[in-house]
Image: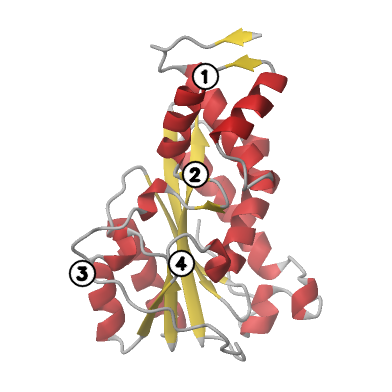
Amino acid sequence: MYRVHAGEESAINQELMNRIDQQFLEMPYYGTRKMRAWLRQEGYAVGRKRIQRLMRKLGLQAIYRKPNTSKRHPEHRIYPYLLRGMPIQSPNQVWASDITYIPMPRGFLYLVVIMDWYSRKILAWRLSNTLDADFCVEALEEAFERHGVPEIFNTDQGSQFTSNDFTALLEKHGVRISMDGRGRCLDNIFVERLWRSLKYENVYLHAYTTGSEARRGMGRWIQQYNDQRLHQSLGYRTPDQVYGCLGERVAV
């Protein structure tokens, strides 16, 4: 077995975080007890407190998953959830955004995407090594510039999305703001499914070593997702075909 010592902050911790993140995509109801049991079966003699700390660092909590970048800011305004029971009938009716963790050899990066709910098209994305709201604002500005504005924009209650810079940009363009209830990953289910596909089909397979390498590799995957990936729920059409902009390319 791999003996994990309490004081280590090295490659073994990164390895554990990667294994926990992968398993959580499969079993989002795993708390620290079940995660510890599973890791021990995989050969890692690691204590529950250590798993708690690593899961907190990843922003993982049993039943639902959200990056720690989505931690709520107590002084920011929270907006109501507007999508309950609403039929999504056209492109640019509802956009959504979320952030996820991308494992790297020494630490991790954060990826934000902006998606059109009707077509599942990724409208803009950014990678960052910080938790500031700037990279989310930049992605939103790019989406507006390239695709116009939606009627409604939905996010979780993370501090990046409730920040004054982010919400003011939405309000400036007359966009109605919708925010998930706390702990409700199903409110943003399409982006959650995207994370699963991206990580299993690209991130875990390539094990990127630098930010520029990750940006290029994920950019190619996102381009193929938009203009080549057929969705059963879209009548076996691609996001680009449904959105109405077939042939557009994502810059990488």
The residue at which mark 4 appears reads as 97
Q: For the residue marked with disc 4, what is the amino acid?
A: Ser
Outermost residue toward the left in this view: 75
Examine the rendered structure and indicate whether residue 244 appears above or below residue 130: below
State whether residue 164 is above or below residue 56: below
The residue carrying pointer 4 sits among few (fewer than 14), some (14 to 19) or many (20 or more) residues within 10 Å by Cα, namely many
Using residue 247 as the reference point, say whether residue 16 is left or right of it. Answer: left
Q: Earlier in the sequence, mark 4 or mark 1?
A: 1
Residue placed most toward the observer, 101 or 23: 23
Q: Position of residue 123 (x, y in %)?
A: 51, 71
Select label 4 or label 2 by which is in front.
Answer: 2
Nearer to us: label 3 or label 2: 2
Q: Residues within 10 Å of mark 2 (few under 14, many from 20)?
A: many
Residue 138 placement (x, y as % from top left): 33, 64
Question: For the residue marked with disc 3, what is the amino acid?
Answer: Asn
Question: Mark number for residue 60?
Answer: 2
Q: Which residue is mark 3?
A: 164
Say what amino acid the circle numbered 1 marks. Gly
- Check whether the beta carbons of the residues at disc 4 and disc 3 lie within 8 A of each other: no
Are circles 3 and 2 on residues that touch, CB within 8 Å?
no
The answer to whether the residues at label 4 and label 1 have Cβ atoms under 8 Å apart is no
- How many angstroms separate mark 1 from mark 3 (CA)? 40 Å
Left-right relation of 156 to 234: left
Q: Residues at badges 4 and 2 in contact (C-beta under 8 Å)? A: no
Q: Residue at x 28, y 69 (%)?
A: 166
Numbered circle sitting on residue 47: 1
First-in-chain label (3 vs 2)? 2
Give the Cα separation between the discs numbered 2 and 1.
Answer: 17 Å
